[in-house]
Image (spheres, rainbow, N blue to C red):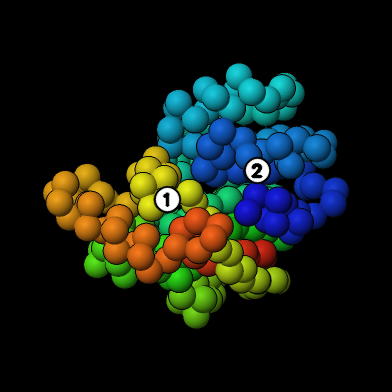
Amino acid sequence: MAERLASLLPAPLPDNVLEIGCGTGLFTRHLLTQPVKQLILNDIASGMLEILSNSLILPQNVTITPGNAERLHFENMDLICANAVFQWFRDPQETLIKLNRALTTNGSLIFSTFGPKTLIEFRQTADLVSPIGLHKKDEWEAMIHESGFAIKFWDVEIRKIFFSSSMTLLKNLQQIGAAPIRMMKTGGLRKLMRDYDSRFSTTQGVYATWELYYFSLVRDN
């Protein structure tokens, strides 16, 4: 996902770049391959930023800014990037408006996020509502245009990811906070795993669908 989003980066990069939700630096690595005047790295989790700082060599023009991007104030950015972050925002449209204001006149925003088909097998089997916002493409289009952006490019990608078992899948989802399985009783969890294994097992293991959206936006002046 990070590599696909990185293919939307301009070359060369503009002077002032912001990455929100940088995590451990999966996408940041691509930003560090090109020189910029200023690179701001943001994430809400201080633990993620610590891992990033210890695993990447950061030049002096890099500033780490911890905190919730929905509440922080940025300005005079030429490019803002967000890889697999927007689905976590409480109000993605309001965040788009804030990021639009943070950009220079010809500034741009590129981001990736998950579509409503993501983990459809898990949500159907467990009869659970996704704890994160999974909007359709037309919903994203409306939010984008109402936030003062024009779409330069967009794409959707459907991936099937295989796991050795439903338990492995559930542990993976729990680690990324995408499955509220703590709310389920032990008996319900066991039934969920049996049902998932019976419905979605293949010779490669059990699978889960991920729908990935990619957007490249520019301020609509």
In percent of the image, x 70 and y 71: which residue is there? Answer: 152
Q: Mark 2 points at which residue?
A: 27
- Give the camera-side residue of 214 and 205: 205
- Crowding at mark 2 (Cα within 10 Å: few <14, some 14-19, many 20+): many
x, y (%) of residue 221? Answer: 65, 70
Q: Is residue 32 left or right of residue 214?
A: right
Q: Callout 2: helix, strand or loop? A: loop
153 lies above or below 23: below
Q: Callout 1: helix, strand or loop? A: loop
- Give the camera-side residue of 92 and 75: 92
- Crowding at mark 1 (Cα within 10 Å: few <14, some 14-19, many 20+): some
Callout 1, which amino acid? Ser
Q: In this view, does 81 lie to the left or right of 169?
A: right
Q: Quadrant of residue 58?
A: top right
Camera-nearest label, 1 or 2? 1
Q: In which quarter of the image is residue 55?
A: top right
For the question of whether residue 216 can be seen, the reply is yes
x, y (%) of residue 91? Answer: 37, 59
In percent of the image, x 76 and y 56: which residue is there? Answer: 7
Q: Mark 1 points at which residue?
A: 165
In percent of the image, x 78 and y 47: which residue is there? Answer: 14
**Quarter of the image where the N terminus is located:** bottom right
